[in-house]
Every structure is written in structure tokens, then in C-alpha cells.
Amino acid sequence: MLLLMALLALPAVAQQQFTLEDLNFGGTNYQKMIPQNRPLKWWGDQLVRLSRDTLWTVNPQNGKEKVLFTRAQLNKRAGLTADSLQVRRLNMASFPYADKPLVLVYNDSEQRLINFKTGKTEWRQGIDYDVQAAEWSDMSRATAYVKDDNLYVTDGAGSTRQVTSDGSRDLVYGQSVHRNEFGIEGGLFWNPQGTRLAFYRMDQSMVTDYPLITVPELNDSTQVSATPAPEKYPMAGQTSHLVWVGVLDVATGDTVYLKAGDPTDRYFSNISWNPDGDIVYMMEGNRDQNVVDLVAYDAVTGNRIASIYHEAHPKYVEPQHPITFLPWDKEKFLLWSERDGYNHLYIYDTAGKLDKQLTSGNWVVMDLLGFDEQQRAVIISANADSPIQQNLYRVDVTTGKMTRIDEGGKGWHSGNLSASGRYLIDNYQEPDVPRNIAIVDTRNNKQKRYFTAPDPWQGYTVPEYRCGSIKAADDSTDLYYRMVMPVDFDPNKKYPTVVYVYGGPHAHNVDARWHYSSRSWETYMAQRGYLLFILDNRGSENRGRDFEQATFRHLGHVEMQDQMRGVDFLRTLNYVDTARLGVHGWSFGGFMTISLMTNYPDVFKVGVAGGPVIDWKWYEVMYGERYMDTPQTNPDGYAQTSLIHKAADLKGRLQIIIGLNDPTVVPQHAYSFFKACIAAGTQPDFFVYPGQGHNMRGHQSVHLHERITRYFDDYLK
């Protein structure tokens, strides 16, 4: 009893306080503060765990591990005794062939396929890390790459051919085009056999240069003056670039260009191949982005075969995914479309005949993970269970039956499918779960928990995270919000509140991940006595076509109406001090921040806008014209959404922050707003990060978020 009383008398262990070095991704302690993960790769249906020095096989039935090999063992077996040849790390290893004990690894200057059982090097090729793009074919073991603006191909035997010689800043080969819109993430596309390569060719010589500059580095005595760093930047309504698609025959070195006609004011995206590797498929859209066709081309001649799918919409059509052929039927493929109002999968044949709509409902397919070829099923992720969840499903192609196959059913699940489709890695978070990893048998839905991450914030002062929904300004649509409560929250107190906003297309802020996907800066602010409120308005992603297209031709206005419904909700909470209401956002969120500050000047006292769009006529062609049409066809919409004429309405304290070298929202936006403020006599504040682009990288992000925090401390708290 005396011992128990003594223990009870001990003072409570003090909870640690977070710093930005803990919470910001550029911070010195950040890697220790994020939920642990387990790097995993499939070798066929064999799961392999990776680390720097050791690989383990993982039994998918029971999760038990066994050492496959160590880095020292691999180097010794392969005879890699020279320091320059030794494999430095195994955590980037992969297993390209399901039926062969071959591991793809890297050293300082080359990549190797090593038989890890015998130690024999089956293939090797030098690596040039100073390339602009590269793509390897695991079938032919050929590598396509772009260096010094020209396209090269090194075949599996190590022979290199220079494919182009006229590449330049104006004439771009083998890289992303259309400014990475339409799901474009690269410009090199191997056929399944690795014998032919489709590639982009973009002529942007006619595109206006935007005059960015690079300032000298600190302590650089060799450079005195700033140097030009112009960016090819086609603004809305202006002349854009021209794009062609070439096809290289690796064996002969011959290149043909797809005969798609005049590329002026057209978009070519979602390039894919048929299983035989002799037909190229491409989505072709008009500049208005309201019509798209899936067109097939002969890869040998470049001749147009046929348009096999057509889709149109009065607002816009936005293809984001290439077609994917069914592995058991080379005449049928999966096509993504929002034509019924939600992003779903359809099965078509190569003649353009609809076989069936595979998925349907008031929810969206978010990813196609692969196939169970033996049992003819498709594995997908979707938000069918909840708009703020992502779950994993098995869809029987014959019957259309859809079965959820993840562990627990709540939260945000990401999947990685084995080669046969039999097994699935289910890596997920829930609002109160930092990370779990389960191994799932997709055929019988048996699940084995493999890894449970500890809470990396154990021992720290952590705020409460809440999630709920309110009605949009249309009085019918549900909008989801997250609130981060002040640390040591007392409902009898009133707290300064910051609305964090993005609000634009192809993004969302609130979902069922850990802490409802809260940004770490919100926790930092909650620790300092603020309440944070985050709402996904109409126009954001994963809610269907009508939800997303509600903002068409007048970006910012429907979004503000919904955000103000959020403010109405905050006014019902006695602990929210609506006299101390702030707003912060970046990019589209920066546009929203200034929009709210100037359209509702008596509501928001303080704002911090990062990289803000000020006038959509200065934004890039593809994105800007999709959502706003052109300044010539929608002059009223552009005038209505421009913030230039709102400069006179600025009343509270506003800080604008940009990167001096921002190639996405060019500095002209901020500078023009300041010019308007000078004319109007209003007084925003300004901070710029030299050498930085649209986002602050590395440790400068810590500096950025300290600056944002101080601004609210100075003027809102």
C-alpha cells in the first residue's frame, strides 16, 4: 500500500512539445515523426521485404519472414569485390521476372540483373544519372533516355543509337507534354515486347518565354549578376505548343510519326499499346477540352486505323488514364469514363463496341491495381463505402459482383497486387491508426496482419482531430470538414481560428487517413492555441463530375460560397472567436485566400496566401482553359474571378509569399496584385524565396512555416 501511494504521488510525466523541426517535412527530426512503413516488393506471388542491407521473404499466409539474402552475400556471390562495383543498398531492389531468381540492383555507375542464387550477372548496363528522362523495358532490356535534349536508345546488348539530333529547349523529345495535364507523367512508352518505343515530340518554339531569373548563390564569387532562366509558358488564350507522337523500331532504327493530322490546338494523351505491340492507342482532345476520341494507329506505318471511342460534354471531358487490355482477351480493354457522372470502368472491344459497364454507382474508381487472370477479376481502389475513404475491391468481370477485400473496412487503403493477382498488400491508415499493413488473399478475402506501426507521436502533446459534414451553399450537397482543436481545449474559452483552404480541382484535404489527413502545421498551430478548420468545397476531387464541374467558368465563386457555409458553421460554435478569423492556403488555396480576404473583408482579419493565382488569364493554357474556357470566349468569367480589381477591398492583414522562380504560378500574379494595391492605397505584405519554385523545398520549408505562424501570432492571436 505504501508503495502504491508513493507511485501515485509521483508527478505526471511531462508531454513533449512539437517543433517545426519535428513536424515539417524539411525538418531535421521529421523522418522520426512520421508513421513507420515496411518497404515491400512482389517477386511474382512471393512477397519480399526490403532494407538497405537485407531482403526477407514474407509468407503471405502467416506473415513469417526468412532472410532471402544480404547485401554482403550478394556482392560476394556476384564477385563484386571492387568498391566501385559493389551494390550500395538493397532498398531500391526489384524483381522484374515472376519466374526467375533475378534481382535488379544498382551501384554507383551501372545497373545489374543478378541471379541471387548463383551469383551470375545476367545483364548489366551503365547508368547516366545526368539524363532528363529514362524508361527501361524489362522484356527487351533496352533503355530509352533523353540527354542534352535528344533521344537515345541502348538495346539489351548494350548498343546505343542516337534517335534524334535536333532536340533543344524549343524542340522537346521523350518528356511530358501539355504541362503534365491529362494524366501525362512522362514521354517514353515501350510496347509490351520492348521492341518499339512511342515517344512525344513537342515543338514549343512559338510559345512565349516568361522571364524568370536565377540569382547568384551565397558565397559564389564566380557569378555577380542574376542570370535569365526563362520558362516556356503558354497562357490562357495564347498560342500553345505543337505535339507529335513518334514510334521507333529498335531493331531497324526507323522512326515513323503517327498520322494524327494537324496538331494545332489539340491534345494527345494516355498513350498505350495493344498486347501484340503493333498498334498504338491515343486519346485525342480538342483545345476546348469538351470532345475526346480514342484513336488506334498502325505502329509500323503510322497510319490511322480508326476512332474507336468518342465522348463529349458541354463543359469538359478530362481523360486521365490509358486503356488497359484484359490479360485473358487481347481484343478487349478497360476504359475509364465519367460519362454517367462518376469515374467508372467500361469494357470495350477493339472494334469500339461496348461490352459492359463494369462498375457503377454514386462513387468513383480511384485506381486500377491489376487483375486476377486465372479467375478473371479486376482489383481496384474506390470510395464506394464513403466519400472520405479509399477501399480495395475485387470485381468479377463475368458477373460484375464487387467485393471489398481490405482489412477493417475503415480508413484509407492503398493496394499493391502480386503478379497473379492472388495476393494483395493492404497498406492503410485510419483516423486513429498511424499505419497497418495486411496481406490479403483476394480470392477468399483471408487477411493476415503483417505490420502495425507504433504511434510516432507517443509522449507528445497531441490535439484532438474531429471530422464531420455540413451542407454546401446549394443546401443539398454534403461537404466534409476537419477541425483540429487547440491543445488543452476548453469549450468555455474562445479561440482564434484559421481556415486552411485549397479548394481546387484534383485535390482534397479531408479523408479518413491518420488524423483525418491533417497537415502537421495544423498540429503546430493547435499547440499554440489556435483552432484549425478545413473544408473540401465543391470543385474538389473524388466526388463525381457534377460536384467537380460546379465551378466551371467562374473559379472561386462557388468555392467561396461553400467556404462561407463553413464560416456559418464556425459561428455556431461558442468557442470560435469569429472576430479573430484567419485564412491560409497555397496555389489555388492562395487564390482562395485572397478571394476570401477581399470578398469578405469584414470576416477574415488575417490571411497568408502562398503562390496565389491572381488572374486566370495569366495561368497556363491546359488547366486554365479547361475550367474557365478562354479569355476571348468567357470575358465576363475572367473579369469576375480576377483579383486585380479587388485590391481596393483589402481590409485585413495579408501576407503574400512566392518563390522567385515559380514556373507554375509565375511571379507576375503577385507583382500585378501589388501594383493594384499601390494604386488603391491598400497595404499587403510580401516575402519571396529566391531560387525556389512553386513550393519551398528542403529546410526552407521550415523557415516558410515559421514565417506563416509568426504572421498569425503577430496579427491574429
Image (spheres, rainbow, N blue to C red):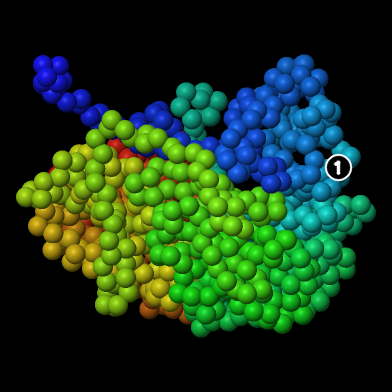
Decide which of 545, 366 is in the foreground and name it. 366
The residue under label 1 is 156
| Residue 117 drawn at (x, y percent) | 79, 29
Front-lying residue, 347 or 234: 347
Q: Quadrant of the N terminus?
A: top left
Q: Is residue 436 visible?
A: yes
Left or right: residue 84 versus residue 498 is right
Residue in the foreground of this view, choosing between 493 and 641: 493
The C terminus, quarter of image: top left
Place of residue 584 in the rendered image (x, y in percent of width and height, measured from the top left): 29, 52
Q: Amino acid at mark 1?
A: Gly
Residue 273 appears at what percent x and percent y?
A: 76, 63
Above or below, comparing residue 138 to residue 58 in the picture: below
The residue at the far front in this view is 1
The residue that appears at 41% across and 56% down in the rendered structure is: 410
- Circle 1 sits in a helix, a strand or a loop, which is it? loop
Say which residue appears at 79% left-offset and 57% top-offset.
191
- Residue at the right extreme, as displayed: 252
Mark 1 Cα within 10 Å, few/some/many (few <14, many 20+)? some
Tell me the quarter of the picture where residue 358 sits: bottom right
- Horizontal side of 289 relative to 577 (left or right) equals right
Please tell me which residue is depicted at 47% across the width and 23% down the height of the picture. Answer: 219
Q: Can I make out residue 211 in this image?
A: no
Q: Residue at x 82, y 52 (%)?
A: 194
Relative placement, left or right, of 631 versus 261 is left
Q: Residue 88 location in percent, x, y?
A: 66, 24
* Count of number-bearing discs: 1
